[in-house]
Every structure is written in structure tokens, then in C-alpha cells.
Amino acid sequence: MGSLLSACGINVKKKKVEEERHLRANDREFNLSFKYANNAIKTSKYNVFTFLPLNLFEQFQRLANAYFVFLLILQLIPQISSLSWFTTVVPLLLVLSITLAKDLSDDITRHKNDNHVNNRKVEVLINGELKSEKWMNVQVGDIVKLENNEFVTADLLLLSSSEPLNLIYIETAELDGETNLKVKQALTLTGDLGNDIQKLAAFNGEVRCEPPNNRLDKFTGTLTMRGETFALDNERILLRGCTLRNTEWCFGLVVFGGPDTKLMQNSGKSVFKRTSIDHLMNVLVMFIFGFLAFMCTILSIGNAIWEYQEGNSFITFLPRADGANASLSAFLTFWSYVIILNTVVPISLYVSVEILRLGNSYFIDWDRKMYHVKSDTPAQARTTTLNEELGQIKYIFSDKTGTLTQNIMTFNRCSINGKSYGEVVDFAGQRVEVTEKTEKVDFSWNPLADPKFCFHDHKLVEVVKSGSPEVQAFFRLLALCHTVMPEEKTEGELFYQAQSPDEGALVTAARNFGFVFRSRTPETISLVEMGVPTTYELLAVLDFNNVRKRMSVIVRSPEGKLTLFCKGADTIIYERLHPSSSKLMEVTTEHLNEYAGEGLRTLALAYKDLDEDEFEKWKERHHEASTSLEDREAKLDTIYEEIEKDLLLLGASAVEDKLQDGVPQTIEQLAKADIKIWVLTGDKQETAENIGYSCNMLREEMKEIFIVAANTAEEVREELVNARKKMSPESGDEPPIEKSRLLGKKSQVVEDEKVDGEYGLVINGHSLAFALQKDMQLELLRTACMCQAVICCRVTPLQKAQVVELVKKHKKAVTLAIGDGANDVSMIKTAHIGVGISGQEGMQAVLSSDFSFAQFRYLQRLLLVHGRWSYLRMCKFLRYFFYKNFTFTFVHFWYGFFCGFSAQTVYDEWFITLYNLVYTALPVIGLSIFDQDVNDRWSFQYPQLYAPGQLNQYFSKMAFARILLHSCYSSLVLFFIPWAAMCDTVRDDGKDIADYQSFALLAQTCLLIAVSVQMGLDTYYWTAVNQFFLWGSLSVYFAVTFTMYSNGMYLIFTSSFPFIGTARNSLNQPNVWLTIFLTTILCILPVVAKRFLFIQLKPTINDKVRHKVRQAKAVPPPLPRKFPRRRISTRRSGYAFSHARGYGDLVTSGRFLRIPVKSRPALFPHTDTPVADSTPQTYRTIFEEAQSP
Amino acid sequence: MMASSYNAKDEDGHHPGSVGSGGPGAVKSKKPDNTAFKQQRLPAWQPILTAGTVLPAFFMIGLIFIPIGIGLLVTSNNIKEFEIDYTGVDMFSPCFNCSQSYSWNSTSACTCSVPFTLDQPFESNVFMYYGLSNFYQNHRRYVKSRDDSQLNGDKSSLLNPSKECEPYRTSDKKSIAPCGAIANSLFNDTLELFYIHPNGSRIAIHLVKTGIAWWTDKHVKFRNPGENNNNLSIVFQDTSKPVNWRKPVYELDPSDPDNNGFINEDFIVWMRTAALPTFRKLYRIIQKKKDNMTPTLPPGNYSLEVIYNYPVRSFDGRKRMILSTISWMGGKNPFLGIAYITVGSVCFFLGVVLLIIHHKYGNRNNNADIPN
């Protein structure tokens, strides 16, 4: 409950709402009149003066803290105060100061970051001069100059740039996570200003635009200049957070500064996630409060009875305060007992929980086995409060691209003229497993080859070299038919900037096989064909789109031959083939099937020679269509259709969408841990299905894989119901909704249904839209949850979140979403746990995630090791913590019956103060930070160990009830054994020992030793630290006790330490120690017996593995490495384009690439850092990092 | 899907080339340190409950506890204890009259004499206790009603006692010394013991009244105010006696300056409040005879002479006089012995039961394979 109220911080004062922004360039005075925010940002919460009051105010909003202040107030009333003020003040101060220190260090970091950002330098045009100025001093209306690779200072209106047509390129990775460059263009009018400082200084355009908002993709406004008004849209705006790329310089007018920028407007407070244990704890704390009230009521009734029966006659010795009678006394006693028994809800619980979560987060950060060497990225626990939830995951929602796959395409196989290449075959004609040692094809004969390109089939090179026309045509097509941009920094060093990695892979393949795509202009494409520079005239680009699923180019060869080259999805190409290709088609189809079976993405390639007249006529019509104002797209499509026919098949290419390392193994492990994996991808159904197979989610041995791809709501419902009936014929029409036990709240939890066998479900985006509608949601959920694996294709980011939300709402299960891109942010934020894949694409997913690491395969370690341990530790901690505090408190309850219900404490007040803070704090933290049942290797060996977490077995209401009973038993032992042993007894010199102080000392010593031994029983993993903490705490107890009960302390603070001499006088008595020994044994004896009995009769998976570990006494045998069987499948993917339209427009528009080859910074700086290796530029083959022998 | 390029060694974190920072000047890697602590590989002892440890433990506890228990029980039984209730509830009891006519302030002392017989001789030092029942010395308001500073001889507290002492803080506008409810209710019966010789003569038994309080209480916790001033009546002159007391604190034992005022041992013993409503407090010690030949208290008839002052009837209290010898484990209390014997037997029994269960089921379950 700790932070229920903490979320509501102090809101910054609200200004009058801005309705329209009006500013004038180069006119600070005018702009200042509107009091727009300048460019300084402030993410810190406090300053020197506000820190203490504000932070304390926030802290006291937490229920726990407020409760303890309430207790403190109660203690100040002398009639009620049953404990000295320090018993509450000391822990409270400690807690407050720990939180204070943490908040302080957080805020200092924020201040530092703010300062760092605010003090960045940018060139600003001030009074006709460019001056270097700090970011924070930039005002709205200033003109700033940005240079290549610089961060955009504020939200700018682009005025002019160094590039032709006033274009600039920006990378928006920090904003939306996409790494591909985006183009922005300035208005021609402002573009003419160029970099002429005079002109820029004289520029006095006025901008009127929308007020600050958080929409990244929209901007509306107008620029008024010399009486003319121009519309401004998002194309002209550079947003803060972007980076300028490939552009020497540009000038921009600051429109929004600092807090008004869209970046800052977007960085709203993220939703505060709580774990299910937090929720359970809230319920339990409420219950504990009730229980506390119950105990206090009983005791105060007892007090009333006692006062009535005994107290009245005992007045002689114990007079009452004036006016007090039995009922008033009972009322006061109630509150007195509230104070004494408050230890059932100890304040240190919350602090300890935070500490151990933080500790476990650090372990995640420190784990070398989740550190990715290539990208130099360690795992990171960005949210430190969710660790134990990692041990309870039931559903994983995963993105595909960049998460399961590397988003790296490798040209892997091809079929040219009916012959398949790319497979490595040994002498006997057997397929050979490709490993790192497999000999690579040597491309050194080709000076322009990409050294990173790998291919293993030597035949293909030989065929190319031998000059086979088909093979040459094949690669020529690949080199010509695309929209890739080349970049040649230095002679011979080519870099390709591709819209989709598939295209890049294909062009790179052509490059290595001797058909080097060198450069392009709007009208020409220059190749180096087998060493011979050749320039093709580019006549038309028939660009790709989602409907056409193909792209073509029409080129004129140097010899003057007109050719149309086309590549596209096989089904589409097949429809447009000339009948003469039908024979080749059959062979190629066979190959395509084979490739698809391996999960490769295939494309069919075809060409067609055109004759001049035909083309001229077509070109005219094309021109007509492309200039028409209405329905241009549709018209163009028909025009394209006309010419793309009677094609001649060349062959097919197969590109591997390379899976991330270890994905199939990870998925198999997770499946063994009974975690269900849903893949939510924007990809097409076929692609997704293929990936599903290649990463082991969908398996051939599954009973059936249902595919839901219907067009109407009714059909979708029907398909879902059919699938469900098939899986479980007896499942009813009404979803089995769990009976809710909590009154008032209507439970929506759908129970799991029994299924025989494993099933898979594939649902496409269209159907998903229907299925997510209100009335069909539950049907979808029921069906999907019965399947082992679910794949949703063509899903929008919103739908991803909806699916997660659906499961979250209707299943009592913990969900995890993992993704890497901006499109995954919604589901990452929605799921209980969001995991971001870092180090590849942008930062957006990581920034909104709770945990991040570089590779999907680390997920198994995060869940099966860290998650499991965290859950185990947290539950152990809670169980033990409640046990020790309940036991502690209940002793007071029993004592109430022997002290006239007067709220007299059993223990010394100092012991009460220090029990949670000192004597038991460190051991329990040690236990809950270091404990592990079995080590990480065994955790991997037996993923079943994960199941108890999913079933909430270690800490639930039942477990809590058991703790209650156990504490009850222990407290009875801890009170009545000393009671009986001390009753009427004396010391060995005849003096008193049954006095209150000796009894208190005995009771507290018994308690401390008993709970310490119980802790020993609970500890599975005794490190030196645990030993040190446990023995240390016990020694500290005795040391502190002897010190506090010493003469010196009494003489200095007489009234604070009245227990003088008690320790010396009673701990030297044998019967005291015999009593301590007896209580300890009696407390743990039943526990040991019960645990042993359960291990014998009903061992849990945990017991079994621990037993096995003991027998093995060594590391577990390495995981058997299984090679997935080869699969012959007809499922095939014909999808090698990105979803978006290509650069086709730009390529042909002539607005592009008027650039001489000059030295200019590379698109992606190729340094030797490991990061550079993983940029999409490298089209590695699958085997680049194969296993070591 | 062909061979996976997933490399198990990569997970290990030990493979060459990644260990160490790569020498001076190398780019600072974010790779976490390879320490046992950070990698959670701290060496640890991982005990588990196996039949091999649990069963012997049970038998061992049984074997240890039963002899200890027997020893304790025998010791306890060897202690001689005699208890007599002299409250006078009963019509026929000698102190009935005294108990009926009760008043704190009565000037005339009521005395009664309670005869009793010891069947067995009491050897060695015999300790004489008074016991009170149903007396809530552990009531919160009672327990805190004292001023330790005052009792420790603090001058300012002597004249201005703590508020905790209310309503026994002041009387007649003078501060009360010692203040508070505990002091006010000081047990003030006087008990004397006579041996009735078979020849009919009454021999007073010498009762030692010092050495009955804890050394720390007597020498540290309780101190008379006014350091070296032997004349306590001057030191306490600005204070008044507790309401229920007959005489001021400096007259508790005028004969012995080391047992007078706040350091009077009867007073100190009383001030060490009991943990439970029924308690006994050491009153006097009967030292063993020097010759060691005759028992300290031979069997025979005795008479307990009580100056009956202390009223307990109003709250159904009882007053007892207890004579007891002691042993290494203190006074007579058979509980520990019985408890040890019981727990030991239970352990032994449990051990047997668990052994049977282990033989019947344990092996089967432990050797069962874990489904994978």
C-alpha cells in the first residue's frame, strides 16, 4: 500500500491555457511578451529549499508513514501511551531518512542530467551574428544552426539546409525508435535564405501555430512572410530528440522550447506498476488491520471485565485517574494495545521490501550471462520494484522483428533457372551442417565485394564466372530492381541505405557475385558488371506497395535493349508469367517450397524484354496517369498492371530473416516452464507462421494449428468456436468465470480449461479486429488460452495493447511483453512487465520498459533464474517477516491475560524498538538477497521449477493463514514455557528472578533465538554473509543488551534504561538457558517434522531437484542439444519488402541525389565499436557465429 | 531451420576474449565484473532435510532431553519447600480477626500466630519468602508508577518527582519519597519464626534481613540522596512519607545505616515488580548452622508470628509464607524437568514414526524421476 498515494506529486502551477502560439523570427522582445517557456528543461523535482518540506509531504502521503505518525500521536497521550515515544520515532526517522536519501540522490542525478543537457552548445543567430549559446538560453523565435550529427535543440521550423531541395535527413530513434532516416523539407521560400547570415538575420516571418501538445506526427500552423501566408505541416518541423544525419548544416526557427517541446510533452509520468504480491499485500494489510482491531477489542473487553471485577477492589494499591471507570479504561486500553500490537504491520516491512527488490535488480544488472558482448549491452532492471513478478509469468507477448529475429537479412539460397544453389553438399551428396568452419566462398576476385558477405556454395560463383546468361540476368536484376541508395565514401567502399533489410541483402548478394550496384541518378543506374562499368538508363520505377506485392524497373541497357525487371511474391509473379515459363515454374515452386520449409523469405524474379514502340505508348499513358489529380494511385496501378505481364521467370531468391541467437531453445525452455507465448507481429500471416515454425513455437507434432482468417465477425466467431470445440469438446458456451470471493467487486476472471494435447492458433489482423470486439473478446480469450502458442499477425500497436489488456483483465496471470520497437511501446506499457530489447533499434521500447537486455535469449535467464529467485526470495522474506512479527506480537496478546489487560509490554521497550531495525533486519535481508534453492544451471535443467510461481504457491492467502497459525503456536510456546518455568521460581542464590524485568529478558531472548533458528531452517543457501549476519545479529543483541543494562548507561540515562543488571543477574542462571533451549526446540520441532514428512510423502518439484542436486553434488549435465528436424513444408513466405512504400518516388523524381560523390560522413559511422557490427548494414549470414566445436 | 548458431558457451560468461578489460587503453566495457558476489556464485553451504540428518537429530534430541529432564526433576524434587497461607480467610484460621479489621492507618498492630509442623529437616540455607496472589504488580499503571531517578538519589527528583508517580507524587504539598504506587503499597507485614522445642520452649529463629536483594539493585540502582550524609532524616526533611506508610523511609531500618532509606533491602525487593500476579519475594534468609551437623530447620513444630498489616482481602488476594531450600537450578519447580522429559520422549517417538514413514514412502519418492 506504501505508494498508493505517492503517485500524486505536486503539480506545477498551471498557466493560463495557451490557445495559439504566435511568434516572430528574430524578434525576442515580441516573443517574450507571450512568456513562452525558453529552452531550459527541468526534470528534477526539488531545489535546495523545497526538498525537505516537499519530500516529507510526499512521504507522509504514504499510508504506512501516515499510520506511524498516527501511532506517534497516540503515544503522546499519557493515558494511552503504552510505549515510549522512541519505539515509533526511531524506526520512522530511519525510514524517512532512507527514503529521503534515495530521493535526494535521484534528484541530484536528474539535476546533473538537466544541467548537462541545458549546457549543450548550439549556434544561435543573435543580432545578425552566429553565437555559440547554451541550450537553455535559446528562446522561442531564435534562429539556430545545426550541424551534422547534432541533436536538435528544440522543436524547430526548418528554414534552410545544405542539401538540394532544402532536404534534410534526421534520425528519430530517441523519439519513436525507428532508425531509418526520415526526410524533412523546408519551404522553398525559406530555403532560399540558404546560409546567408544577413538574409537570415533579416528574416522576420511570423509563425502562428497550435499550442504545445504531445502529438509527434502532426503539426499545423502558418508562416506569414511579406504579407504572404504559407501552410506549415509536420514535414517542416524538426523535433527535439532527433539527430541530424547526412546533412552538413541547416537553420531552424525555434517554435517550441524546453518543456513545450513534443519530446518533453510526451515524457509524461508512466503508469506506476505494482506487482501481484503488492496487491496481495494490500489485501493482507487490510486484513491485518482488521485482525489488529479484533485483538485489541478482545483485550479491551478483557480490560473492562478486569477493571470491573478486580480493578475496583485493587484501587487500594492502584488508584485510577480521576473520573476513570471501567468503560473509559477499556477504551483507552484499546488504543494502548493498538500501539503495542502495531508490530503486526511493521514499517520496516516496506523498507525491507524495497531494499531487497533493489538488491535483486542489481543482480540483474550485474549478470554477465545477460551481457551482450557484441553490442556491449548489459541487462538492465529499469524498474526496481517488479522483480518477483518475473517469477510468476504465465503469458509472454512477443514482438517478432528485432525481438525473435535480428532484423538482419542474409541472402541464403537461390534458384536460378531451375537449379538450386546455396546448400553445402559433401562428396556423397549429403547435406552438410554449416558451421563456422565451413569454407566460405572467396570473393577476393571482386574488389568491390562486401567483405562481410558470406556464402558457402562454391558452385554459384563458378557459374557466374562461367558467364551463364540466366545467372547473370538473375544478379543483374537484383542489382537493378530496387530502391537502395548507395554511398561511396572512398573509392570502392560502398554502403547501401536500404528501405528494407531484404532489399539490402539482395543487392549486396548481387554485388558480391559481380554485379555491383555503384551509384544512381534519377535517370541512370551504374553497375560494375563482372568488373566492367555499365550504365543503365532508368526509364521507370514501378514501385512496391502492399497490394501489388512486387516492384519493377524498366531500364535501357547500354546496347539499347529495353528490359523490365520484376521481383515480387511468387504467387503474384506466377500469375503474370508467360506460358513458356510453366516448366521452370514447376521446378522453381519445388525449390520455393523447400526454402519456405526452412523459414526463408522468398521472392520470385522475372524479366521481360520490351520493344520500343510498346514502351513509348505505355510511357505516355503512364505520364498521363501520374499527372492526373484524381485517383492517381489506382490509375497508376492499372497502368503498371498492363506492362507487367508475360514475364519470363528467372528464378527465386531466398533470404533468411535471421533469428536471434538461441531463440528456439529459449522458446522451448519457456514452454517447458509452462509459459505460453503469443507472438504479436505486424508481419504477414505467412511470414509470422514461418517464424513460428523456425523458432519452435509451432511444432509439427502439435495436434492441430488453427488459422483464423475470416472476413466477418460471424465467421470469426464460428472459427473460434469450432477450434475450441475441437480442442475440448465438452467445453460449454458460457465461459467458466471464477466465483469472486471479494464482495462488491465482480470478478471477470476466466478459468483455464483442460485441453488434451498441444494446439496452435494463428489469427490475422483482420480477424483479430473482430475478435477483440466486446462481445467476442471472451471467445477469443478462451480459444487462445487453450493453445500452446498463439500468433497474431498484422497487428497494430493498439491491438497489441488490447490483446495484452484482454489477457490481463480476464486471466489471473502475470503477463510479460517483450519488444524492441516503437510499435511495441503500447503493449510493453500495458503488460505487467515490459521488456525492451536494447542495442538494436531505437530507444523507445527500452525507455518504456521495465527490464531491458540485448537478446531475446536472455529472457529465459531473466525468468527462470532471476525471476524465480526473486519470487522465491520475496515470498520467503514475506513469510518469514510476517512470522517473526506475528510471533513477536502475539506474545503480548497472551501476556494481556496475566497483567490485567493493562497493555503492559512483555519485552523491554528498547527491544521492541530494535527488534525489527537491528536484531532481525540484516539476517532477513541476507536471506532474501542471497537465497537460492538450486543454482542457475539446475534452474535451466528443470524449467518446471518455475511452475510454483505461476500458481502463486509460495505466498498466498493460504500461506498467510498458515503463517498465522504457526506464529500462534510459536507465541504460545514462547510465552507459556517461560511463564511456567519462571512461575514461583528463584535464582540459585534464592533471590528474585520471577520479576518483570527478568521475565522480559527471558521472553525476548527466547523469541530472538527461536526466530533466528527458524530463519536458519528457512535458509537454503548459507553464504558467509548469511552466517555473518545471523551470528552477528545475535552477538549484537547480547552486546547491546549487556550495554543497555549496564551500570554506566543507568547512571547516565536513569529513566531510559531501568533494566540495569537484569542481564547479568538472569543470564547466568542455568534454568534460564534451559528454558531458552526448550522453547527453541519446541518452536522448530514441529516445523522440521512437518517439512520432513512432506518431503517424504509429497515432495514438491523443488524438493526433488534439491535432492537430486545433493546426489549429483556437481554441476548438472549440460543441456542436451537438440537439432530441430528438417521440415518439409508448403508454407511459404513471399514477403521481402517492408510494409511502407519504397523510395521509388524520390528515386525518380529527380529531386534526389544531385550530389557529387564527395566525402561526407557515413550514414552509420563505421567504427570498430561492437555496436556498429549490429547495425542493419551488415548482412551477415546465418553461420557467421556458429557454435564452436 | 538448420543448425542454430546459438552458442551455449556464450551464456557461460567465461569464454576467452571476454574476460578482463583487454589491457590498458581498451574501450571501457560495460561488462559486469566477474565476482562471485555479483554473479551470485558465492560459495554456500546448502543443507537440506534428509533422512540422514533429520532422524538422527530427533533421536539425539530425545537422548539428550530425557536425561536432562530426569536430572532437573530429581533436583527439583530434592528441594524442600514448605508453604503456609496466613491470609486468614477461613473463620478458624488464626489471622481471621486481623484480616477482618483492616486499616492502613491503625496504630495498634494486629498480631497473630500461625503454628505449623515441618516433617522433614531443611538443610543448608533456608530461604523465607512471602507470597502474594492475585496482586497485579505487573499492571502497566502500577509498573510505571515510580521514579528511578529519585530512587537513585537524585536530589532534584527527590523534591520534584516524576509525573509518573501520580497520584502518589505529593502529599501535603510536599513531595513523596519514595513516590509512586509501587512504593506506596510496600509489603509491611512482619514475619517472625519460632521453633517450638519438644520441651515447649519457643526459640526464635535468627532471620537475616540483608543479602536478599540483587547486588546491582542494592549498589547501583538504589542510592540514598545526599551522598555522605548519614543523617537521613535531614536529607528527607522536605519530603513526606508515602500515604500508606506508617513511618518515613529513613526509619525503615534505623539500626543499620546500610539498610535504611532507599537502600533498605525489603524495599528494594518490593520495588522489583513481579512479572505475574502471583509471585513470591525473598523476605529473610535463615543461615545454616555453623557446625553443619544439625539441620538448619529440624523437623518439628514451629510458629509463625505475623504482625498483620497488609490488606489483601479486598481483592481476593492471598498471603503466604514459604520456606524453601535451593539447588543449582534455583527453587522448586518441577515444570522444566517434566517438560524436558516430555519433549525428549515426543522427539524419540516422532523419530520412530518418521523412520517408519521414511522407510515406507521416502525412498520411493526420492528416487522417483522428475518428469522432464
Image: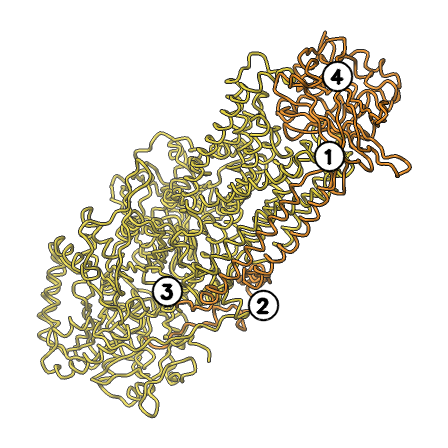
Chain colours: A yellow, B orange
Say yes or no: labels 4 and 2 on the same chain.
Answer: yes
- Residue pointed to by mark 1: B81
Chain under numbered label 1: B
- Quadrant housing residue B97: top right
| Real-space Cα separation, disc 4 to disc 2, in angstroms | 93 Å
Q: Earlier in the sequence, mark 1 or mark 2?
A: 2
Say whether residue A1126 is visible: yes
Sequence-first tag of 4 and 2:
2
- Measured along the vertical axis of the image, is residue A660 above or below residue A720? below
Q: Position of residue A392 (x, y in %)?
A: 40, 54
> Residue A428: x percent and y percent?
33, 92
> Which residue was labeled with disc 2?
B20
Number of other residues with Cα within 10 Å of mark 2, as a class: few under 14, some 14 to 19, many 20 or more: few
| The label number, if any, that marks residue B112 in the structure image | 4
**Marks 3 and 4: in contact by CB < 8 Å?**
no
Q: Residues within 10 Å of mark 4 (few under 14, many from 20)?
A: many
Tell me the quarter of the image containing the N terminus of chain A.
top left
The quadrant in which residue B151 appears is top right
* Residue farthest along the right direction in this orientation: B291
Where residue A112 sits: x, y (%)?
53, 45
- What kind of residue is marked 2? Gly
Frontmost of labels 4 and 2 is: 4
Nearer mark to the viewer, of 3 and 1? 1
* Residue A809 or residue A881, whichever sits in front: A881
Considering only order in the chain, which callout, 4 or 1, is on the residue closer to the N terminus? 1
* Viewer-nearest residue: A144 or A371: A371
In this view, the mark in front (1 or 2): 1
**Who's the residue at 45% across and 60% down the image?**
A1099
- Disc 1 from disc 2: Cα separation: 77 Å
Real-space Cα separation, disc 3 to disc 2, in angstroms: 35 Å
